Amino acid sequence: MESAHISSSRRKEKKLVDLIYLDKYQEGIDLKPIYQSKINTWLDWMNNKLDKVAFENLGNKEQEEYFVVNHFLRHFLLSRFQWILESVSNEKLRQRYLLVLPPFTQQGTIKNFLLHFFCLKELKHGELAYCSLNNSEKEIRILWDIYKLVKTIDTVAVLKKSVAGGNPFQSQFSAEYIDKTLNTVEEMLNLLVRICVKNEHYEGIRYQFPLGVFKPETILNRKENHSYLINSVALEKFDYRNYFFHIYYKPSMKARYRGKDLSFRYNYLDFEIMRQEFLIDWLNSRLKNNSKKMSVLEQYMLGNRSFREIVKQTPEKEIQLLKKLPYEVFNDLVAHVNETVDREDRAEIDPLSQAKGEFSQQLKLFRKAKELTKKSTQAIREYVGTMKESINKTINVVIPRTQTEKEPEKQQLELESNFQLRLLKAEEINFPFFHQEDHEYPEHLGLLKSSIPAEKQEEFKNNVDSLLNSAGEERLLSRNSPMRERVLPILVKEKTKYGTSMQFLILGTSSSDNGELNTGEALAASRTIPFFVYGSKVRNFEMGETVESRTIMEKSFHVYHPASPEVVKRVLFLVDMVSKNESLFAG
């Protein structure tokens, strides 16, 4: 991160954690000359590009893109920066606007912003130059922005609930202004999703964003069939970015949608401050003396003192310091606390940190997807084929489909009129095993084992063993690396008062060749370790954070962290229920 430096040696008493030094943090630092210098650097770069356009015979698209970049720098970014300096008289508010103004305190600052929103690439020596993008590249970038929009709309809903519920967060704004701002932002962002996404995909993307869109096989499918989720106008012209720029940098926006003229007046920077105020209130009030929060604050150093030391000595300074942190550092610190505290104490909104939490994990998927979309259809096809081949090599038994095999609906088993179960085949789930990263496998297995209560571990192991034995070897999937596994993937349909809930449960055992798993004393005592992987199609926030997504029958499912008490409770219930229904394996 640009505003933090990580070290583990500057304080001898901190041997067990990495201390995060906020070197760029200074009391009352003047951001105006820093920002002006950054803007001037890019304006100079742009002037050189425009000079090149004037004297060289560049293609029309290249010329157009340079002019659009120039328009952004001058008309959007510079004008908003000047407005803050010239029109905001309150010094504290002016400083906070500068701290949340994109992209200055975000990762990669202006360069990353330009590389994302424009048809540019970075050359070996650091220079940016025009680079045409294919439709897959454009689509994956737009989908990532839509994902962030959906997350922001979710945040708006939580903030509105807080205000309407009579227990609002502490804010410098009036309740009426907060309500007006939240409603306007929500309406604008919903409009932007509608403008970008094709009608037939709007519901699925807006209300339960399918993270599977960033998977290689789904990218290949859309590219091969020229069937994209994004409207052709947004995809081909790439003009969707102008709506983002208006929202970020302008005080008003006019749009025409489906024959209606729409007009919005707003200050998006106020919304960003409101979002931070909600999170600050959560940190300061709900987690006031939370020991796990304090353990995180102990790792963040301001000068030669930890955040915790300052807050403990002068509690009222906590809010002051949090308000003065740059946007990226604030999000990282909050996300760090959020993933450390107990599940019931976590914030209701995602801090959107690029270094911590669920959002950071999805960012990794997006970055991999972005690199993949640059490749040709043939190259992507070969990549997907290599992935499938790698998985198939680890599967010892795959049951071929025969004429006598029952159709899926006939395999389903009704339980207590609320549940339907059926076994999944290898080709119906993109990854049917425990964990994909070999070097992280033992760590995750140890974490899962410790998440099951001690008094339940023996019962869980017996039930899993019983299920695997009842299923028979011909129904199990297996692999030998990084550990020997026997797995049983089950699709679960549950009828609830809200409709049908789609879930999946992978049960299996893992064992090493020599009977020793080098994961500490907790695992060394047992040669065969039972495990589970549990997820659902629609995100259930009561289950805690998600760690990945898996594709089942061409649909994306959220996989939950196994340490969540609600997940463990749910899995133990399902295992017990399934173990008592041997007819699942009949036929």
Image (cartoon, rainbow, N blue to C red):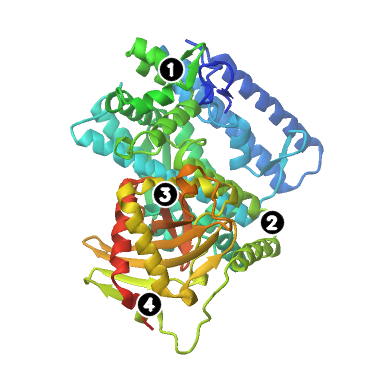
Give the crowd class for mark 3: few <14, some 14-19, many >=20 residues within 10 Å.
some
Mark 4 and mark 3: Cα distance apart in space: 27 Å
Q: Which mark is residue 449?
A: 3
Circles 1 and 3: CB atoms closer than 8 Å: no
**In front of the other: label 4 or label 3?**
3
Upstream in the sequence, badge 2 or badge 1? 1
Quarter of the image where the C terminus is located:
bottom left
| Callout 3: SS | helix
Position in image of residue 148 (x %, y %): 46, 43
Give whichever of 407, 273 is nearer the camera: 407
Q: Residue at x 67, y 24 (%)?
A: 41
Position in image of residue 38 (x %, y %): 62, 23
**In front of the other: label 1 or label 3?**
3
Q: Which residue is mark 1?
A: 307
Mark 2 and mark 1: Cα distance apart in space: 46 Å
Q: Residue at x 44, y 85 (%)?
A: 405
Q: Say whether residue 251 is visible.
A: no
Give the crowd class for mark 2: few <14, some 14-19, many >=20 residues within 10 Å.
some
**As drawn, which residue projects farthest toward the left?**
166
Query: What amino acid type is highlighted by mark number 3?
Result: Lys
Q: Which mark is residue 585?
A: 4
Q: Which mark is residue 256?
A: none
Residue 495 in the image: above or below residue 482: below
Circles 4 and 2: CB atoms closer than 8 Å: no
**In front of the other: label 2 or label 1?**
1
Q: Which residue is mark 2?
A: 375
| 498 relative to 395 in the view: left or right | left
Mark 3 and mark 2: Cα distance apart in space: 41 Å
| Callout 4: SS | helix
**In front of the other: label 3 or label 2?**
3
